[in-house]
Amino acid sequence: MSIVVFSSSSKDTCYIAFSLADNQEVNSWLGSVFGDQAVPQFEVNTRTVDVLYQLARSSEARCNDTALLIEDLKQKASEYQAEGAHLQDVLLQGVGLSCASLSKPAADYLSALVDNAIVLGVRDTSLCSFMPAVNNLTNELLEAEKSNRRLDRDLRALRKRLGATLVLRSNLQEAINKTVKSQSVESAKAEERLLSMGFVTRKTKEFSNTRERAEAQLVSRNMDKSITHQAIVQLSQEVTALKQEIIPLKKKLEPYMDLSPSPSLAQVKIEEAKRELAAIDSQFEMKVDFK
């Protein structure tokens, strides 16, 4: 396809024309689109020329379709006008009615009937045309009411779910707030425990070091283990046990206190008791001294 570019000497406007039969088609399309105005400047290349040609063909096709539709509408309008004129002649000649002879209420009713026919989209105002249209509208109304009822049920269900969701959200938010508050309290307690644990750990380490140094000093000084706190506690327990052993011995001697003493036998018993008491007292005093 050969391309010829024409440049206007007045406004330097580029016109694109195609060779052979396309030249007249594109030029006529550009002239019809812009009319008396000059064609705007554009870059001339193969793509723009092809697009312009396709636009011209599409515009021409749409114009033809529009023209056919206009002709069809004009034809229908003329048919309707002819039919209306025929009906007017029938009414005038057969019944003797005309638009001028109708009363105002009748004219209003007739206008309302026509308006209803236009709204319903029927071809004429006969009952056979009105009834299907009214039935269709009734069916559409019933379907709309049915859809509205279904939507109302869905809306009530959604509102119920929304209420339950809001309650659940409120409960969850309250639980979250309580959990956050509890976590903050527990975090403070845990931090306090960690501080206390650190303090106790340091003190334990200090006491362990002190004990180890004291034990090392005692070992270096050759301290007798019998005077340690544990040994003294053990001696105290043994002394308490001996005191408990003395109590039944004293009770055993009580019956003999009331007997008339036999000088020789009493002397022997007294000496034995004295020796036993002396031994116990010496043992007790020894243990007390150790304590």
Image (cartoon, rainbow, N blue to C red):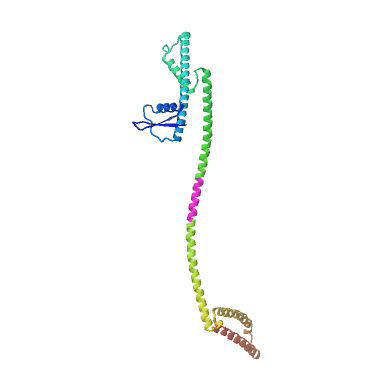
Residue 172 to residue 277: above or below? above
Q: In this picture, is 109 found above or below 188?
A: above
The front one of 37 and 4 is 4
The residue under the point 52% across, 18% down is: 127
* Residue 220 x, y percent position in the rendering: 52, 83
User: Magenta region, mostly helix, strand or loop?
Assistant: helix
User: Picture coordinates of residue 185 (x, y %)?
Assistant: 48, 58
- Depth order, front residue of 194/285: 194
- Indicate whether residue 148 is drawn in magenta: no
Q: Nearer the viewer, residue 289 or 5?
A: 5
User: Which residue is located at x 52 percent, y 19 percent?
Assistant: 129
What count of labels does the image hold? 0
- Residue 136 in percent (x, y) is at 53, 24
Q: Could you tell me residue 210's position as x and y percent?
A: 50, 76
Residue at figure coordinates x 50%, y 75% from the top left: 209
Give the residues drawn in magenta, as a range: 167-181
Q: Is residue 178 magenta?
A: yes
Q: Quadrant of residue 239?
A: bottom right
